[in-house]
């Protein structure tokens, strides 16, 4: 089959004719509501009147800031509508005969348990299609070697090889990307295609057979699959982290596939070695997957997304693990935006440029939370307003728009990877996302300060600490306390703007609720520990 024929059959529309009509009905009504709200919001009369003369520019600045806070989420939804308008799925293609394939995973002794390594090995070795299985062992561990020998896998370690353990660059020490690049430099030339999967994931038997066929098209650099967590029952955090992924790996990734720009996700993907070699292997970055994917798309390589559950892994089960993961992702994404994106945009199409830029705004939700708190403080403590508008007409236009967006999201859940399991209000996902907002702001501050963030393996498996260090929620406590002080001072000074009072109350309750929840969980864990200790002593 020719490459041209493959490109024609590769993508099929996800929505049928009736679903597409409903989709555009949702979009049309949503755009109408957005336009009406924008027309009201941006009326010149709504600019505050705190200053006069040359100082009037401060009023415009305050209005710009509050507009950013309010419109950040609204615009994100508009971009999501644009992306998901092109949802596609690839038509199945049989792998080409004779491909030299490797299936690899990394292992960090002491950070990742041996039983997880063994499950991962069994899954990779058992995958259908002729391939070699490799473990990339950061510690040159004897038990890891024995397990590889037991399952017929190959073992690689860069330990004590100076060239592959540099302080920076593509072979940076103690990074997943550096580990991968060391292996590629040593063995990549032996293979045409390499499938890679994180150690906590177990691939299905058809992982390779369902992904290798798309490399018949020589313009395809990589094939992505969903990052599915199978441990949602372990904790609220695990379930919340899983719920956060449903929309992204469903409608969003399907839509990005329709734009020929599937996001490269490090947890599991399949890579053309020639494309990665042309790119200089994986980028030497804390989020090497995002930057590598952008580099490949800037070089005009294509990507394919297979929206099927081909591997199941573990999500973070504790706040510490979750915050560590989110800090790494947020820091890496913001760092890429500030230091790499605009250079790469020059080589991208306008569509790819726009989508990458807008998606990289996601982690600025932490900034909007902090800016909102500052605006509240300026009003309640100093009487400085950021907007001059009545609460009732504003809410009458804003609330229907937000409700419509929420209904649209619920409708789009039929296009998630597993609609039967991934539908609902996803309250746990919203809780953990709210808890992550201050972490996103700290990541932004870290990037602006030029602070280096080292790669840290997300704790996995049994033995992860059950109690949560309260210091993790210090930012939440600070934000909640600031809002509470704002309310107290505002009540004394007679500043009772309804929307701002409601905003401050919600901010206080939400931040304190998160702190209270952690205190309760720690107290419960301590009491259970005391109970078992009493039983053992008896």
Image (cartoon, rainbow, N blue to C red):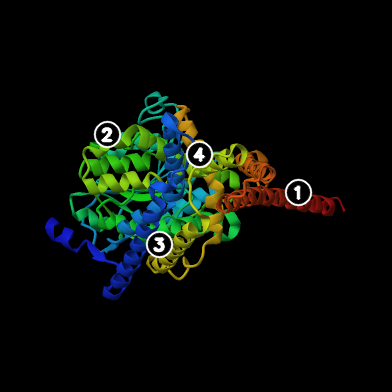
Q: Marks 3 and 1, Cα distance to the nearest angstrom?
A: 38 Å
| Residue in the picture at 30% in, 55% down | 256
In the image: residue 505, left or right of residue 418: right
- x, y percentage for residue 17? 26, 74
Which circle's residue, 2 or 1, is located before the other in the chain?
2
Q: Residue furthest front?
A: 53
Q: Earlier in the sequence, mark 4 or mark 2?
A: 2
Measuring from the top left, give residue 406's x and y in whole percent: 45, 63
Q: Secondary structure at mark 1?
A: helix
Q: Which residue is mark 2?
A: 343
> CB atoms at circles 2 and 1 under 8 Å apart?
no
Is 126 in front, or is 110?
A: 110
Label 4 – label 1 distance at C-alpha: 31 Å
> Where residue 344 appears, x then y in whole percent?
26, 37
Label 4: state its secondary structure: helix
**In the structure shown, which secondary structural element does the residue marked by tag 2 occupy?**
helix
Lower position in the chain sequence, tag 4 or tag 1: 4
Residue at image point 38% right, 54% down: 38
| Local SS, label 3 | loop
CA distance for labels 4 and 2:
24 Å
Tag on residue 441? 4
Please give the residue where the numbered disc 1 appears in the rendered image: 526
Answer with mark 3 or mark 1, whichever residue precedes in sequence: 3
| Marks 3 and 4, how far apart at CA | 33 Å
Residue 148 or residue 535, whichever sits in front:
535
Q: Foreground mark, 3 or 4?
A: 4
Residues under labels 2 and 1: Cα distance?
Answer: 52 Å
Q: Mark 2, residues whose alpha carbon is within 10 Å: few (<14), some, or many (≥20)?
A: few
Identify the residue under disc 3.
309
**Marks 4 & 1, CB-CB < 8 Å contact:** no
Instruction: Give me the residue at 39% from left, 26% from top.
Output: 168
Q: Is residue 301 above or below residue 16?
A: above
């Amino acid at each position: 089959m020719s490459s041209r024929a493959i490109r024609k059959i590769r993508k099929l529309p996800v929505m049928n004719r009736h679903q597409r009509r409903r989709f555009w009905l949702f979009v049309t009504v949503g755009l109408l509501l957005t336009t009406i709200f924008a027309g009201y919001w941006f009326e010149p009369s709504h600019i505050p009147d705190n200053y006069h003369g040359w100082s009037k520019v401060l009023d415009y600045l305050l209005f710009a800031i509050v507009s950013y806070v309010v419109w950040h989420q609204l615009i994100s939804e508009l971009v999501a509508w644009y992306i998901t308008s092109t949802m596609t799925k690839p038509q199945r293609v049989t792998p080409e005969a004779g491909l030299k394939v490797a299936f690899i995973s990394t292992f960090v002794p002491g950070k990742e348990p041996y039983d997880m390594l063994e499950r991962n090995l069994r899954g990779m070795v058992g995958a259908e299609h002729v391939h070699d299985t490799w473990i990339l062992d950061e510690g040159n561990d004897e038990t890891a070697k024995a397990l590889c020998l037991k399952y017929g896998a190959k073992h690689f370690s860069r330990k004590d090889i100076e060239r592959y353990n540099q302080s920076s660059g593509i072979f940076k020490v103690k990074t997943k990307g550096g580990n991968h690049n060391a292996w590629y430099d040593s063995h990549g030339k032996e293979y045409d295609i390499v499938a890679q999967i994180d150690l906590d994931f177990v691939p299905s038997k058809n992982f390779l057979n369902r992904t290798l066929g798309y490399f018949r098209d020589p313009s395809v650099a990589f094939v992505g699959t969903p990052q599915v967590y199978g441990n949602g029952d372990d904790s609220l955090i695990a379930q919340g982290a899983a719920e956060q992924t449903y929309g992204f790996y469903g409608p969003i990734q399907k839509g990005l596939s329709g734009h020929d720009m599937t996001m490269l996700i490090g947890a599991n993907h399949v890579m053309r070695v020639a494309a990665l070699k042309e790119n200089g292997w994986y980028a030497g970055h804390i989020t090497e997957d995002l930057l590598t994917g952008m580099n490949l798309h800037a070089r005009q390589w294509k990507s394919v997304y297979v929206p099927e559950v081909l591997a199941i892994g573990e999500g973070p089960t504790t706040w510490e693990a979750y915050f560590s993961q989110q800090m790494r992702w947020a820091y890496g994404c913001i760092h890429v935006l500030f230091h790499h994106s605009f250079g790469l945009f020059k080589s991208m199409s306008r569509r790819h440029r726009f989508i990458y830029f807008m998606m990289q705004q996601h982690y600025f939700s932490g900034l909007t939370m902090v800016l909102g708190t500052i605006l509240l403080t300026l009003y309640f403590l100093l009487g400085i307003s950021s907007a001059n508008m009545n609460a009732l007409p504003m809410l009458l236009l804003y609330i229907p728009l937000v409700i419509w967006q929420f209904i649209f999201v619920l409708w789009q859940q039929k296009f998630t990877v597993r609609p039967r399991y991934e539908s609902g209000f996803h309250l746990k996902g919203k809780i953990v996302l709210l808890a992550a907002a201050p972490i996103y702001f700290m990541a932004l501050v870290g990037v602006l300060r030029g602070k280096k963030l080292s790669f840290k393996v997300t704790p996995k498996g049994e033995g992860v600490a059950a109690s949560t260090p309260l210091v993790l929620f210090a930012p939440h406590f600070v934000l909640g306390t600031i809002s509470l002080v704002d309310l107290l001072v505002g009540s004394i000074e007679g500043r009772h703007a309804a929307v701002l009072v409601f905003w401050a109350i919600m901010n206080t309750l939400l931040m304190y609720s998160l702190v209270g929840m952690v205190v309760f969980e720690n107290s419960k864990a301590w009491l259970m520990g005391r109970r078992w200790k009493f039983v053992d002593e008896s």
